C-alpha cells in the first residue's frame, strides 16, 4: 500500500491536553515562529478564544481565563514568549505533587453506630444528674437500635443494644434488662405490614335482591309491571 502523504495520529506527537484537540496544539506550536512579539501575542489571544469554544465547560470556573493561559503555556512546552495578563506557570509548579491529606486514625469498634454517636455516649456518661443520665441513656439506646437496623437490616434483641451501651459508656449508662426500646424502623415496618394486609382484603360487593325489589309495591318497576298486566 502506498502511504505517500498519509500520516496516522499514532505517529504524531502526543496530545498534551485532549480537551482542545490536535489542531489547537499545532496552532500553539506555530506561535514561536511569529517573529513580531505583538503579532505573536494577538495570535495567542485568538487561540485562547478558540480554546474556550473547544472546551466550553471551563467557563464554569471563576478563574477560567487564568487556566486557559496556563494551558496555553503547558501545551507550548513552557516555551512561549508573549504578553500574558498572568504570570506564566513553571514546570515545577505543575508537576508538584499535592500534599497528602492523611487518613483518620479514629479506632471505632462499632462502625454501625458511627463516630458521632460514640462521642454522644461519652458526653452523656459524664452527666452527674442521675435522672438526666438515665433519660439520655434511653434516648441513645433507641438511636443505637435504629442505627443497628439501618446497617444490618435485621431484627436485633434489645439486650444486645443495652450491653453495647453499657460497654461503650464504661458502665455509666445502664438500662434495665426489662426495658423495651423503640425504633422508627420497626414502627414503620409494622405499619406497612398492616397496610398491605388491609389492601389484600377484598371488599364484598352487595348484590341487590332483584326478585325482592320486583315484588315491592313501592318500587316504580313493580307499578309499571302491574299497569302492563292490567292493559292486557
Image (cartoon, rainbow, N blue to C red):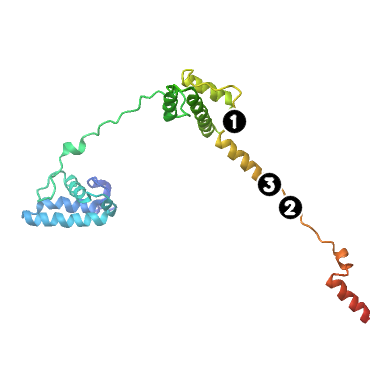
Crowding at mark 3 (Cα within 10 Å: few <14, some 14-19, many 20+): few
Crowding at mark 2 (Cα within 10 Å: few <14, some 14-19, many 20+): few
Q: Label 3, on which residue?
A: 198
Please name the residue shown 56% across and 23% down the image.
160
Please name the residue shown 83% across and 72% down the image.
220
SS type, badge 2: loop
Query: CA–CA distance between discs 1 and 2?
Result: 33 Å
From the viewer's perspective, tell me whether residue 89 is left or right of residue 163: left
From the viewer's perspective, tell me whether residue 189 is left or right of residue 226: left
Which of marks 2 and 1 precedes in the sequence? 1
x and y percentages locating residue 212 in the rendered image: 88, 63
Quarter holding residue 183: top right
Query: CA–CA distance between discs 2 and 3?
Result: 10 Å
x and y percentages locating residue 135 in the rendered image: 51, 28
Please name the residue shown 82% across and 61% down the image.
208
x and y percentages locating residue 207 in the rendered image: 80, 59
SS type, badge 1: loop
SS type, badge 3: helix
Of residue 192 and residue 62, the one placed in the foreground of this image is 192
x and y percentages locating residue 221 in the rendered image: 84, 72
Q: Label 2, on which residue?
A: 203
Which one is in front in this view, the residue at disc 1 or the one at disc 3? 3
Q: Label 1, on which residue?
A: 155
Please name the residue shown 73% across and 51% down the image.
202
Which of marks 3 and 2 precedes in the sequence? 3
Amino acid at each position: 500500500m502506498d502511504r505517500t502523504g498519509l500520516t496516522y495520529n499514532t505517529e504524531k506527537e502526543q496530545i498534551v491536553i485532549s480537551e482542545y484537540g490536535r489542531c489547537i496544539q499545532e496552532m500553539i506550536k506555530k506561535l514561536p515562529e511569529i517573529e513580531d512579539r505583538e503579532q505573536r501575542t494577538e495570535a495567542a489571544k485568538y487561540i485562547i478564544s478558540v480554546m474556550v469554544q473547544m472546551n466550553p465547560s471551563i467557563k464554569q470556573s471563576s478563574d477560567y481565563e487564568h487556566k486557559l493561559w496556563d494551558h496555553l503555556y503547558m501545551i507550548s512546552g513552557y516555551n512561549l514568549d508573549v504578553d500574558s495578563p498572568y504570570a506564566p506557570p513553571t514546570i515545577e509548579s505543575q508537576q508538584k505533587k499535592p500534599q497528602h491529606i492523611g487518613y483518620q486514625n479514629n479506632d471505632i469498634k462499632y462502625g454501625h453506630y458511627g463516630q458521632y454517636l460514640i462521642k454522644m455516649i461519652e458526653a452523656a456518661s459524664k452527666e452527674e444528674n442521675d435522672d438526666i443520665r438515665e433519660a439520655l441513656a434511653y434516648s441513645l439506646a433507641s438511636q443505637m437500635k435504629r442505627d443497628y437496623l439501618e446497617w444490618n437490616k435485621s431484627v436485633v434483641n434489645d439486650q444486645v443494644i443495652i450491653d453495647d451501651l453499657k460497654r461503650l459508656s464504661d458502665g455509666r449508662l445502664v438500662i434495665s434488662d426489662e426495658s423495651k426500646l423503640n425504633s422508627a424502623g420497626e414502627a414503620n415496618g409494622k405499619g406497612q405490614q398492616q397496610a398491605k394486609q388491609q389492601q389484600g382484603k377484598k371488599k364484598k360487593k352487595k348484590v341487590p335482591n332483584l326478585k325482592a325489589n320486583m315484588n315491592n309495591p313501592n318500587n316504580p318497576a313493580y307499578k309499571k309491571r302491574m299497569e302492563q298486566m292490567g292493559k292486557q
